[in-house]
Image (cartoon, coloured by chain):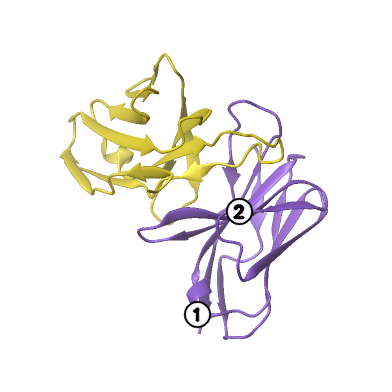
Chain colours: A purple, B yellow
Amino acid sequence: DVKVTQSSRYLVKRTGEKVFLECVQDMDHENMFWYRQDPGLGLRLIYFSYDVKMKEKGDIPEGYSVSREKKERFSLILESASTNQTSMYLCASSLFGTANEKLFFGSGTQLSVL
Amino acid sequence: RKEVEQDPGPFNVPEGATVAFNCTYSNSASQSFFWYRQDCRKEPKLLMSVYSSGNEDGRFTAQLNRASQYISLLIRDSKLSDSATYLCVVRPYNAGGTSYGKLTFGQGTILTVHP
């Protein structure tokens, strides 16, 4: 089974801190994604990457950056955390080039910014 | 208009009931369609893909209506274990190649099945 591992289940940070969320997948997937999930808004795509060192903005990239130095690892960076970035963050991966690609999600990181 | 819209519910049904969810999408050139299921405090997982001709997996039936731009999920003989949030997911038209794999999620429909 594909495993997508997020480094922390719960994280509490202060406004202005730099925050790193790490995600690792073990199935050699090309595509990796970062979503945030908020009540009433569903999952919204922040950034995605279809190859090492490649990244594309999703629907809500403001305030975030990403890094993909190795195929298995995709990091989400909050340069200066703000309270409106309090959310559940979900990492996912999928195989490139399949018509009905299946997303595999990590278990999520609940980030609270105080 | 949102790219993918669902009735958030909640739907509260007794065991054994049949329940249906609809979802509309705005991009007429959308290519692929899915239903994901998310249990409380868990990550989403693929329930089923939705094919043009409609498809069935046990008690679950998915339909696609391209003309009206909606997809549906029918659950027959509901079980307590079907209680979850059901997410409608659409892959928009891929014009540039690099956005392959990008999926857009609806906000989810909450289902509670009670004894």
Task: Name, please, the residue furthest toward the top.
Answer: B53
Q: Which residue is mark 1?
A: A83
Task: Judge whether residue B91 can be spotted in this image.
Answer: yes
Q: Say few, some or many: other residues with alpha carbon within 10 Å of mark 1 (under 14 / 14 to 19 / 20 or more).
A: some
On screen, B22 above or below A10? Answer: above
* Residue identifier under label 2: A58
Picture coordinates of residue B47, whole percent (x, y): 45, 33
- Residue under the image location 66 percent in, 41 percent down: B99
Residue drawn 61% across the image and 62% down it: A61
In the depicted structure, whether residue A107 falls above or below residue B70: below
In this view, the mark in front (2 or 1): 2
Residue in the image at 37% along x and 48% along y: B1
Q: Tag 2, which secondary structure?
A: loop
Image coords of residue A5 (percent x, y): 65, 54
* Residue B64, position as x, y percentages in the image: 38, 23
Q: Name the residue type under label 2.
A: Gly
Residue B86 seen from this side: no
Viewer-proximal residue, B26 or B113?
B26
